[in-house]
Image (spheres, rainbow, N blue to C red):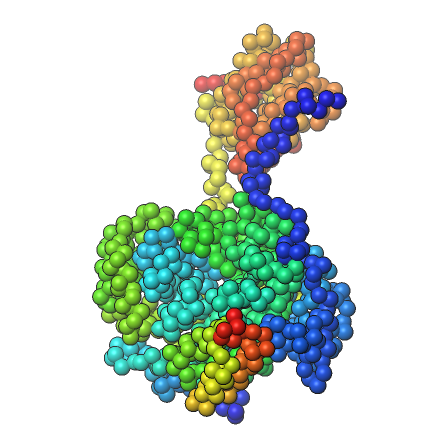
Amino acid sequence: MSAENESQYPLGENDRDTIKAKSGRPLSEMTLDYVRTGDARPDDLSAEASTLIVQAEFARQAGYLELAENLARAAEMTRIPNDEILEIYEALRPGRSSYHQLLSLSQKISSVYDAERTGAYIREAAEVYRDTGLLKYNV
Amino acid sequence: MNTARMAGSKRFERLSRREINREVYVNELPELGLIVMNSPGDPRPSLDIRSGRIVEMDRRDMENFDAIDRFIAAHAINIDQAEHSMSLDSIEIARMLVDINVSRQEIMKVFSGLTPAKIAQVMNHLNVVEMMMAMQKMRQRKRPYDQAHVTNWKENPTLLAADAAEAGLRGFAEEETTVRVARMAPFSALALLVGSQSGRPGVMTQISCEEALNLRLAMKGLATYAETLSVYGTIPSFLDGDDTPWSKGILSSAYASRGIKSRFTSGSGSEALMGYGQGKSMLYLEIRCIMMVKGAGSQGVQNGSISCIALPESLPNGVRGVMAENLVAASLGLEVASGNDAMSSHSQMRKTAKLMLQMLPGTDFITSGHSVMPRKDNLFGGGNFDAEDMDDWHVIQRDMQVDGGLKPVREKDVLAVREKGARAIQAVFDYLGFPEIADEEVDAATTAFSSDDMPDRDSVADLAAADAFLESDLTALDVVKALDAKGFKDVAEAVLEMQRQRVLGDYLHTSAVFGDGFNVESALNTPNDYLGPGTGYRVEGKVWKDICNLPQAIDPVKLVCEEASDPNLILRSVGTAAPGECLEVVVALGPAYASVMDGTLAGISHAEALRAILDGIESEGVASRVVKVWHGADLADIGLSGAKLSGSGIGIGLQSKGTALIHRKGLAPLNNLELLGMAPNLTLESYSALGKNAACYAAGRAPSPVPMKIDNMARLRLIVHTTLLHHREVNQIDKNRGVEEMKAIFP
């Protein structure tokens, strides 16, 4: 965490030169000239997990604990592809999933994407849905 | 008394037709949730924590928790703080809210340990002024802003881009669009992005559509924030919205993972409207929503009843309850976009009165949508404030020295940015091979009042192209490329910087917006630090100068013409005036009369006005004399000075701005015989009749009323002119000259 502790909010003002995109490309290289070459990819303009972890730490330090937790989940979710994000959302809507479907989704997300927080969140939903009648066939 | 013979009151009949009486008012009906605050069905506060876990909350055991209770208990109450917070009296917490010595951070800490019922109890202690005082302190970001609605009935992308550009220029920090035909969403999001960045780089944009589509558009880089995440305070309502606290929560994280800011939406009355109020007050259910928003880790919420606003407003203390929900959100540390977006009343007075609760203390976004277009083009159901209310907004800001988030603009600047936005989207459409935007569409969009002014487009072709755009790999990067290739380098840079900001994530924080130069302003780096007078956000410096800079405001000196004498009236002094002895009326003029001024406020020349008075006196067979009073400019003084010199004791006083009266020797200065006090309404007939009446008084005959126009607004229009002209009269006072007799010559 040492590098993160040295960061200062806002990163755009204080750490722009050291920030990398999800693709690994330094943000400072994301110039109009570079876009002109046609080589830029969407991952060049997506946040890297470590950046969101730094942002989560800023939120925590400022007392916004729940936002910090959300950003920590978001950091994990940078590793999950768009389509699967939409699938997780769909699975969590009421009456869409069985208890076991949610548990296996939770397990998959935790292990495949190294997303422990997100997995736990889905697992918690599975339990509440089971207890309060929000699973498939209940609603 | 025979009541059957009594006719109805004509005043009541007139009142019944007023706008305010086109609304529906009902008494409370708690069983259906038709109660804004303090329902008999609301639980009393309680909290029981065992082994670090909430086992009872607001008189409900954990076995009986519904999914919302479970979510709140797990995510929205700080267990370490709860015991202390819940031990405080609700009245004590209410007093902390208005105490300038208790900081925003301390309040947030206390609120982090409260249950929904306890928070409702705190709000029940506050009147609206106390809520406003508290909001001034609890708003998270230092400076308030406003959010725009940008839509049009024809869903014309060129008009959308032009309106988006104008919204940027006007100072909106966020712009929201939506669609009539869902398939247009990709083009509408694109037009909003390109237009907004043409108006002011850094304006954040969003499109309100179905959640999954919304997320896809945001992933393409076409939107920078989202506020479609609706939550409800009862489970059946939630299910009708096809979501749960967990599904909404995961969406919030999903948006953040793609570098997109999001806020939730909730508001009083939605549960009752959907049939699931469960006998609870609207505020109590809304507090549950706000706590879910907080628990989900969202940085903020748009609340303030939003589209349900007419429901709480049909009930007692509806506007107060809605203000309470804004305040609860801020006190829980959330960004608040405080409603005022959906049509709330037929009555302009009622709408404005409600607006003041948010505008005067300032919220993060005073409205969660203020139309930059006319009402009929607002696809969010009409909108509460629109393009035609802009100048009212500006003047209210200037009246109160408050920042309502907007700044006055010049027509030429508006036309310039509108054209730029329209040309930029034309270029993008061309480069990306979308259906052509003709030059005539650009011209029409630049000057349009509404979408009626726009030529029709081939909507089948547009929809097909929008579908293809959504399915394609094209992203905001291709938009950057298109803008750059077509010569819109600055807009390309702005759209690109908006994408870079997604890599940085600075704007994911509470209340974040971009000020000029893409400088992020959030609760982290520009926190609201209000602690009473002399602290916090003060409207001063450049902001105040901008607010004062109304295009309508002019240099007061230019309001009246230059000083000039009247060429048609020469007043020649024949020495100090002496008392007369015959049957006469003395006409006493103000010191500036005909010498440095030449006409009255009604635009009557001094020669004509004096002539009419003298003719009027003469028509009654009475003699007249003219004097000029140099020692003062007050009308009573001028008139009484004339009367004292008059052989009949009757004098007429005539100020240079045209105000006139008849006075009699021996009366107290302010006790005149007849006063023509509204100079702008006087005509030559009035002056002539005044002369006749004065002569009648002198001769002992009965006068008849002086004819006058009735225009009650004349004072409003001419009060500055009056001030300036009277100042000229005062400047001519020469105490040493006293009263001089004048020979009036009409060359």
Does B262 sit left or right of B493 as displayed?
A: right
Q: Most extreme residue toward the bottom, as rendered?
A: A2
State whether residue B122 appears in this view.
Answer: no
Which residue is at 71% across, 65% downward? B43
Q: Is residue B139 left or right of residue B493?
A: right
In the displayed orientation, state which residue is furthest to the front: A137
Quarter containing the N terminus of chain B? top right
Q: Position of residue B100 (x, y in %)?
A: 70, 66
The residue under the point 33% across, 62% down is B183
Is residue B395 among what the camera can see? yes
Residue at 51% from the left image edge and 81% from the top image edge: A99
Residue B411, above or below B296: above
Q: Residue B164 appears at what percent x and percent y?
A: 38, 59
- x then y, percent, for residue B193: 37, 65
Q: Which one is nearer the viewer's eye here, B264 or B522?
A: B264
Q: Is residue B356 left or right of residue A54?
A: right
Q: Nearer the viewer, residue B460 or B404?
A: B460
